[in-house]
Image: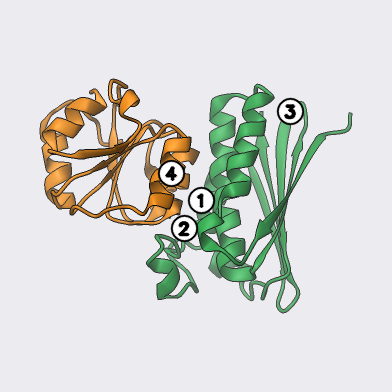
Chain colours: A orange, B green
């Protein structure tokens, strides 16, 4: 699934790395606990989270993730966005809550959960 | 053959910069042409260790040794030490406070994750002196 399709489906705003919107992703993982992301998420997943700190980006970097989706309309700080930009990670912000955002992506049938 | 050695200082004062040594190690291993799966496992294990050093021990050092057949990561701190290592290795056991939980860590998955992603891990710790974690990932 293209990141641009995710953006449209979630009615999300892009905060950085627009040029990567055509990249393909195969799976998604939603969590606020970064250790669980490190333990259970697969590489190259999309990370869906409501947690706002630079460790979200570093966690994504460890797993070579291409996109982070912040839910509940939460705005990441410029420091977070800048770290993501430096590392080519697309940052999306959606007004949907985590349950709804995850449900919409799951229902698309285009992303696996592992 | 002498290993290629990389040394990192882990700053314990600033949580927001935690993980920088792991990011740097990841870049270096990539430059060395280490396989992606090995880099991923080393990165996750070292990142968890780095976070632990920052939240529990006011920072420390990380030394990475690259051998032809394995990568060894040695994390050392002069923090409070771990009174019961077996207990600390249990998934879900944590002494982290709410401040750490709010940052997305402290779920008691750090040490278990480090063990999960490495072939060998030893933890040596003395209360009041510090902790040394040695991890090996085979190439």
Front-lying residue, A2 or A42: A2
Where is residue A51, by image quadrant? bottom left
| Residue marked by disc 3 | B69
Same chain for mark 4 and mark 2? The answer is no
| Residue marked by disc 1 | B113
Q: CA distance from mark 2 to mark 3?
A: 28 Å
Q: In which chain is the residue bearing label 2?
A: B
The answer to whether the residue labelled 2 contacts the one labelled 1, judged by CB atoms less than 8 Å apart, is: yes
Task: Write the residue at 28% across / 20% down.
Answer: A22
- Give coordinates of residue A81: x percent, y percent: 38, 45
| Residue marked by disc 2 | B109
Horizontal relation, residue A75 to residue A33: left or right: left
Task: Write the residue at 22% across / 29% down.
Answer: A111
Secondary structure under the numbered disc 4 in the rendered image: helix
Task: Write the residue at 50% across / 58% down.
Answer: B16
How would you rate the neighbour count of disc 3 (Cα within 10 Å): few for under 14, some for 14-19, many for 20 or more?
Answer: few
**Viewport quadrant of the N terminus of chain B:** top right
Q: CA distance from mark 3 to mark 1?
A: 22 Å
Secondary structure under the numbered disc 2 in the rendered image: loop
Q: CA distance from mark 4 to mark 2?
A: 28 Å
Secondary structure under the numbered disc 3 in the rendered image: loop
Q: Please tell me whether residue A88 is drawn above or below residue B19 in the rendered image.
A: above
Q: CA distance from mark 2 to mark 1?
A: 6 Å
Q: Please tell me whether residue A55 is drawn above or below residue A1 in the rendered image.
A: below
The extreme right residue here reads B1
| Residue marked by disc 4 | A82
- Give coordinates of residue B106: x percent, y percent: 45, 65
Q: In which chain is the residue bearing label 4?
A: A
């Amino acid at each position: 699934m293209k990141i641009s399709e995710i953006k449209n489906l979630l009615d999300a705003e892009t905060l950085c790395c627009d040029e990567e919107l055509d990249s393909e992703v195969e799976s998604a993982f939603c969590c606020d606990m970064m250790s669980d992301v490190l333990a259970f998420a697969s590489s190259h997943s999309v990370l869906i989270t409501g947690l706002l700190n630079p460790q979200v980006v570093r966690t994504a970097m460890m797993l070579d993730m291409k996109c982070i989706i912040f839910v509940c309309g939460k705005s990441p700080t410029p420091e977070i966005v800048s770290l993501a930009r430096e590392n080519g990670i697309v940052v999306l912000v959606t007004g949907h809550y985590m349950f709804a955002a995850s449900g919409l992506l799951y229902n698309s049938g285009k992303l696996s959960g592992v | 053959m002498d290993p290629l050695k990389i040394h990192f200082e882990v700053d314990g004062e600033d949580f927001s910069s935690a993980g920088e040594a792991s990011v740097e190690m990841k870049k270096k291993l990539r430059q060395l042409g280490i396989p992606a799966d090995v880099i991923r496992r080393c990165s996750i294990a070292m990142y968890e260790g780095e976070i632990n050093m920052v939240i529990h021990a006011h920072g420390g050092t990380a030394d990475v040794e690259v051998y032809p057949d394995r990568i060894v990561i040695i994390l050392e701190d002069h923090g409070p030490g771990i009174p019961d290592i077996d207990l600390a290795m249990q998934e879900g056991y944590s002494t982290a406070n709410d401040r750490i939980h709010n940052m997305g860590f402290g779920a008691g998955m750090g040490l278990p994750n480090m063990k999960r992603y490495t072939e060998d891990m030893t933890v040596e710790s003395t209360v009041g002196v510090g902790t040394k974690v040695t991890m090996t990932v085979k190439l």
